[in-house]
Amino acid sequence: MFGSVKYRVPRGFRDFPPEVAILRKKVIEIVEDVFERFGFDPIETPVIEYWETLKGKYGDEVESKLLYRFQDPWSEEWLALRYDLTVPLARFVASHAPPLPFKRYHIGRVWRHERPQRGRYREFWQCDADIVGSPYPEADAEVIDVMCEVMKALSYKRFRVRLNDRRMLRGVFEEELRISKYGDEKTLEVFRAIDKLDKIGREGVREELLRTGLKGGEVQKIMETVEVSGEPEETLQFVEERFGGNENIKAALSHLSGILDNLTHKGKVTVDLSMVRGLDYYTGPIFETYIEEPKIGALAGGGRYDDLIERYGGPRTPSTGVSIGIERVIDAGLELGMFSLNQKTKTKVFVVNMGLEQRGYARKVAEEIRKSGLTVQVDLMRRSYRKQLEYCDKKGIPYLVFIGDRETRTETVTLYIKSTGERYEEIPLQQAVEVMLRKSR
């Protein structure tokens, strides 16, 4: 009976075999390197937070459907898996009061109970970089530049940045629709509907807006507004000329202009009024990085959240940050041929013993090679010489160090380099190590 049971991971979750895990580790190390070059320091927070910590920060739809929530059987308190890394950061800052500006990065898993689809999983990794304490556009410009530098470091060239400001949309809605008369919750409902544009299309968004209670004419004006998109200067000028008297729009235009003035990657930017970001805690500028093909959604995104830390009992602390989705970055990179799964092991060297009597010397050789920093395996299965070679072929191990009777007697090794076919017969171990280190550079 036991043998007939098929054990598998839950829908939306995945195992990562070595070749995938190795690629993921490489990508994360590249992201970490960029973060650290910009002066961001790492932190860690628990994967589980109290439900009270997360409640009221994301919006009703997220909190009612997408958060993994459960009750602790001992304390009977409600807990939840973290949905993102931003809300835990706000709780952390309110609790620890670090010196400002606080530039932190955090790389870790998050969980969302949503429908799995291409580029969207229920468990995935985020790489976040945030600047806490600065209200100025220079901070937003820096996190956008960090986002762009990560894309470049990962060999993405044809990416674009969509830029908007929630205050600009609020201002347009106030001027065109007098939507503020419905209250702030109505504006948030409109934002959530617009955020689904890429998922459900124009007609789907139109239907969602009508379900909020807006009239047909109001919905039509909203749909016309979110079609405004283009080069930054032209788009901002258009908005200013048409709606420039509104205080929200004035603040947004001033801040966006400041971002563009300080942005190294200004040529990558499109101002797009349809981009709103779905989470309720955003208060100002918002941005996303995307590629035209494959259509996999935003690879990274973020924005300003000036009120979030205050909700945890801290002072009002302006903050801005970006989150990079590792799953989408890797999935798109594999599809575009930028990444490969060719590396099946981290092992560089395999010490092959030609017979069981050479095992002791083989272990000593492996120990010495490891001291150089090279990664080494020896046979632990008491396999034949031929079976050891088959294993090395399957794993793609590039350097083979052979230990036979003569090598054991003379305390030498024979080195074979698979990529070139070079063979060094009965040479001192130190010479073999030097050759492998030189070839590995």
Image (cartoon, rainbow, N blue to C red):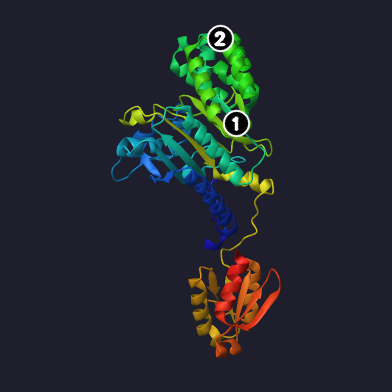
Query: Residue, x 69% and y 38% (percent of image)?
Result: 293
Q: Is residue 15 visible?
A: no
Circle 1: residue type: Lys
Which quadrant would residue 215 be assigned to in this image?
top right
Disc 1 or 2, which lies upstream in sequence? 2
| Relative image position of residue 250 (x, y in whole percent) | 50, 15
Residue at the right extreme of this rendering: 421
3D distance between C-alphas at marks 1 and 2: 30 Å
Q: Within 10 angstroms of label 2, few (less than 14), some, or many (20 or more) residues? A: some
Seen in the image, is 106 located left or right of residue 225? Answer: left
Residue situated in front as seen by the camera: 315 or 189: 315
Quarter of the picture containing the C terminus is: bottom right
Q: Is residue 332 left or right of residue 135?
A: right
Residue 81 coordinates in the image, percent (x, y): 42, 42
* Residue 162: x %, y % from top left: 59, 29
Residue 48 lies in what quarter of the image? top left
Q: Which mark is residue 266?
A: 1
Q: Secondary structure at mark 1?
A: helix
- Residue 407 visible here: yes
Q: For mark 2, what is the residue? A: 176
Q: Are marks 1 and 2 in contact (CB under 8 Å)?
A: no
Q: Is residue 254 toward the left or the right of residue 44 in the image?
A: right
